Amino acid sequence: MNKARQYYLLALFLALLIHGTLLSFTLGNTYDAYVHMFMGSHYADNWFETWNYKWYTGFTMTSYPPLVHQIIALLSKIVSHKLAFLFWALVAAGLFIRGIYHFSRIWVTDLVAGYACLIATFSSSYIEALHIFGQLPSITGVALLLNACPELYKWIRYGRGSYFITGVLLLSCMTVAHHVTTIFGMVFFIAPVLGVALIDIAADKVGMEKLKISHFLIEVKNHLAQAILFAITGLCVIIIPIFPYWYWSKTDPITQVSIPHGSRASFILETDLGLVFFLIPWGIFLFFLPGIFYKLFHKRNLLLGLSFALLFLLGTGGTTPLPKMLLGETAFNILTLDRFTFWASIIAIPFMAQLIHSLIEKDLGSAIKNNLGDIAHKFIIFLYIISTLFVSGLIINFSNYKSLQPDPIEMQPIVDFLERDGHDRWRYMTLGFGDQMAWLSANSSALSVDGNYHSARRLPEMTTRAVERIENSKYLGEEGLGALRDFLATPEKYHLKYLFSNDKFYEPLLYFYGWEKLKPLENNIDLWERKDVPPLPTILPKKSIPIYQRLMWGLLPLTCVITTALIHLLIWFVRKEDRIEMLRTTTTYSSNRKWYFFYGVWAALLLLCLLWTGKKWLEHQNTQTTPEETLLNYYHDLDFKRFNKAYAYLDKEDDFSLEQYLLELSLEDGILASYAKLDTITIDSIESLSEEKKKYHLSVEWFTATHKYTTAEQHVLHKRDEKWYIEKKSMQRATPPDQLINVPSINFHKQGRRKAEIQNTDRLDVLDRPSIAIPQSHLVKKNGHYYLVGEILNTDNVPAFVTIEGVLYNNEGIEIYRTNADEHLIHNLFPKESSPFRINFDNWEGISEHQKREVSNFVIFARSMVTDEECYKFTGVRSIELDTHQLQLTMDNYGNQEVSIPQIIISYQEDQTMLWVDRFYMDTGIRPQRQKQVTLTLTNTERILLKKRGTAENILLNGSQASTRETNKFSNGHRKGQIIYNNNLRIEIFSNGLVGQ
Amino acid sequence: MIKSIQHITILLIFCLYGCREHVPESISVQIDAEIKLFAPEGFVVGEKIIASITTLGSVPQEATLLIDNGLTIMTLGVSTNKQQTLKALWLQQAGRYTLTVIQQNKILGTKSFSLEASTLIEPLEIYTGPTTILVNGQEESMLTYIPADKYDNGITEARPINYNTTVGFLTSPTDSVRNMISYKKLSADVKAEKIILGVSTDALSSTEQVVEKISDWPDKIEIEAIRHYPYADNRQYTRLKTKPLSDKYGNQVADGTLITVTQNLDTKLTATYKCIVIDGVANAYLRNPNRAGTYTYQATVGRVQSNKLPLTYKQLVDSIPHQYTAATNELMVGPLISTQGQLVPDGTAVVLTTSKQIITGETVDGKVILDLQSLSETRDAATLSIGGLQTSIEL
């Protein structure tokens, strides 16, 4: 066995061993592995069913080529989904190495192709694609592409039809695995391969040295028939195997807002994305780029060189405007560009191998030995090997340094919950699960309103916003949270009742939107429930495709694979393999002095970058040289809860310990302390009190699930021993008056099903809906948007959870839009308690401007149900001072629990007609028997227009029309304390709050 | 004359027979199959029926039997001249059934029969709603009974129904089942209580039904001060308590009823607190104000307002000792001693006001040091205030 073969087999062995072993550890941390397993689980349940109900409100499986998913489905009949994924990943790895070997043999010698296999095994782009991204279909596609290329080369070069058949069959497999690879592969891989075949034919006649473009064009003309045949066949191969996919794309095209992706960012401005999408995939290749370019732009390899250059450029994303210009705005915003870098790095492998071969055994190595000595030569090789292994190890362990996913979640408790007591009769949602949400979907039959395959979704709440998934909405800013709020405010629209939260960040939003936190599950995932949501209908809508398409989708992919395998097996026995005749070049590395020069320049550039990075890193370590740095780092450490590090920035002159500091921090609860992320810090002004003492006035923006906060902070900094320290602020001094608090309270408990039976709830266990009244409700307009404002009163003797839905109509009584009251409402009302409410119509998707102008009437549907949720009503508002538009007040907590997030709701009434409702959150919590002051900016109501005064006819209470008598009975009653705002305008203040969760 | 009559008669008879339309004769059709039914347990729902389909020829032949109960049609493959069993599972609906035998698109025969409902089952199916009604006849509840067998077929026979309850009925429209239904309405008297109801007939009974008579809105509220520390210290809580709350009929108001208590200084609203009723009584805890004065407290729920309760709070301190240190540019305020001779509580707010600035501090152990470095160079008149007590100072 020759060396090339040995290296090839060694690479195959190492690839299976290393990647197979490692994947079992890295699989759970990848982005896409669970998604593919989820898709596989669908086919395992119902092979020919193309409609999947589990995500969004259903989506079609024909939106993604099915081969890999179907293979996982088949294998999952024998082993688990994870093992099935792993097994196919090994097969793909084997195919990949084989593909590299045979693809490389088109461009380099057999021995170098052997080197290429070894390099490919440790290729950072392959490792990233498999162990970080989990892109198994893409890897399968590339592996098949690489195996198809030599077949097509030989077909053109030697004219044997059998190569055409095997090549086309491999292309068909590639299409059913990953169609994007086929489409772009034709351009970037197949075209250069066919081109180089024609070049070789021409070179056979005139010799490579004398080869000109005219000779090449003559061969193109001679092989025109083959080209046309290939074009037609190629088209058939792209369309027919996944025809249902093209049919779906044509009939139901993607019409959503572009979803941001890191691969489109500028890698210079966003260096962390540059790390993931540029530095990592290129890895050690970066150092050898000049050598790679040098060989790629050799005459014979020119076509491939152009492909490589284009792919390299496209892979740089938004770093330059060129990729966008080349792809066009639409394609740029739809495609993820990391695939181009991946393909470029694959193309580079043979030429990288050539360089390394030259370094180890050929002219480059000889030159180094002659000039620097044998030891230096061995050291350089050693350095290369160690670097390769080091970089590979770093990439595989990347998730240990930079968290890409939340910690692994045990799904069984969630699955158990969904499958018992009919909980799967409603939809659910997850927050903070990362890509593990797909794993939950794979293991449960319940339906989720969210999903992880963006091309297939059609829900307007998601398609009109630049959001990937709802479950990670906090990372997507206002767009993401806006989409989440839509779902939380109107959960009945999609029969959404349960929410599993793995992130405390969302708690304030969930609570104030009327969701109730139940007991956490055994895996410490918080379970939230929304009351009064109807279950899913028995029959759900679905999009059916013609039976022939379902048969195609179910049968063709595996047919392609089986046919390909059988044909290859047959041909392997029968066909004599044509050896690719390499046209050796005389050009070497060491003989070209220009190459040394360019390489030197490149090495210097890289060194400079390295030094610059090192300098930045060192500067970053020294974090207190300026007051600005000190403040920034202090706030960053606070934001990431690194309190010990934050303590280091504080001035110790006052002699307070870390313990004291941590204690004071732990006592300070509130939306900012516990539920906020730091967004920006702006220095408003600096007062220089002395050489070594400065006072900074900051505006700090915090990002919370409910809204953005801006707090004004003042810090005094002292310089001691060349470092700046922040003067510690004193905590609130006031202490509560009583050591032991005794406040009578009441608890309610709903028994639920009183008999221990699995049947539906007995009629006798269903409580009547509490009586409610809406004393007033009006349609108002502010800044061009419509709102419904009013007041709801619980007239019953039991606590009520209320839902208020507002619907706007035009003159003809046609509905324009409907939505619910969200956080501008106290959802849980005790007997005889009232709350103002406001329903916002300022974010309605799909409604034309013309329709918005037609709004003329409204109806309010209010419904209630008995709640036993613990409600905390032991608060008050005092020290109320009104100054023009500023309202200063103090909220007092006289009860025995901490109010983590106090909320103030203010209603504005003019001549007893409600005009507006505001809600505010205090930024810190209030412990028992303590109070916190806040200053609120009131709304200027002069620009609010009362469009329609509501009557009983506009109100439906628990399904029945409100009566005028009842409405009037309460409309002028229950006047609590009101404050005169100006002239006829009065404001009422309501306090509410999220009690320590 | 007689001859004329004879001629006319013959003419008339001729016309009669001549003008007569040919009336087609009705053709009697032979029915090819006869369906006979045998119900061993009687024609009652849930019992099997044996059907035999007999044709003229005695050879068994394949045919289709349609079982139509007026709502659904079931199709069954049968053989003629053989007995077929119609399963009890198919015969659960009471009413009229039609059997039709079809062979090669030709109806061989039909047969109709009726099935009666089965016997009444226990517990009797009762519908009660609403389950809570306001006292004093403001709302009504209704108890409805629909006798049914175990397959939910209504039972039509009239039978006497006994409605049993702890209170009497105000209306009694029926004591027996008519048109498969029987109902009783009830409304509440003035007493808030739980009504337990039941229905029975013959030896069968229903499960317990419950209707709750609930109290109305509170009639009047009276508040009194239970604990009152009469100093404006912005710290202690004044506890107010309502007298037992009841509606106008004397029923205690529901637990959890929310009461709002407001605090006013003259006509200005200074505080609004929430409290809840437990066992008819609400306790409100309101923090003492930070300024001396006479405050008026009032509780409200709905349209009902309580008495106005005035409470006076005296000044916490009589004087504000202070000392300015030019060297350090600091103002030391305190020790602040309250009127009972103790240091003011930690956290008592001390405010220094100039025409351009306000500096606030909180006391610790009765003292506070205000850093005046941020004040402008030219200092005009300044005022120190604590809890409403003000004093002018010179810096």
Image: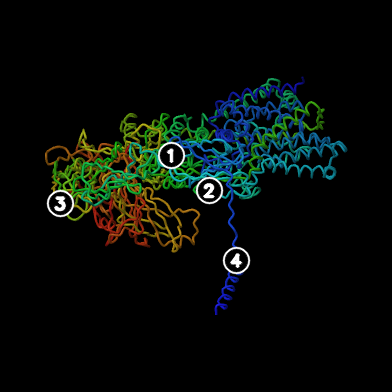
Position in image of residue A704 (x %, y %): 41, 43
Q: Amino acid at mark 3?
A: Lys
The chain letter for the residue carrying disc 4 is B
Residue position for label 2: A463
* Nearest the eye: B48 or A911: B48
| Left/right of residue B49 with respect to residue A195 in the rendered view | left
Position in image of residue B140 (x %, y %): 26, 50
For marks 1 and 3 on the same chain, the one whose residue lies earlier in the sequence: 1
Position in image of residue B2 (x %, y %): 55, 77
Extreme-left residue of the structure: B340
Mark 3–mark 2 distance (CA, rounded to whole Å): 58 Å
Q: Amino acid at mark 4?
A: Glu
Neighbours of disc 2 within 10 Å: few (<14), some (14-19), many (20+): many
* Nearest the eye: B383 or A440: A440
Mark 1–mark 4 distance (CA, rounded to whole Å): 52 Å
Extreme-front residue of the structure: B2
Q: Amino acid at mark 2?
A: Thr
Residue position for label 1: B45
Q: Is residue A632 visible?
A: no
Residue B308 is marked as: 3
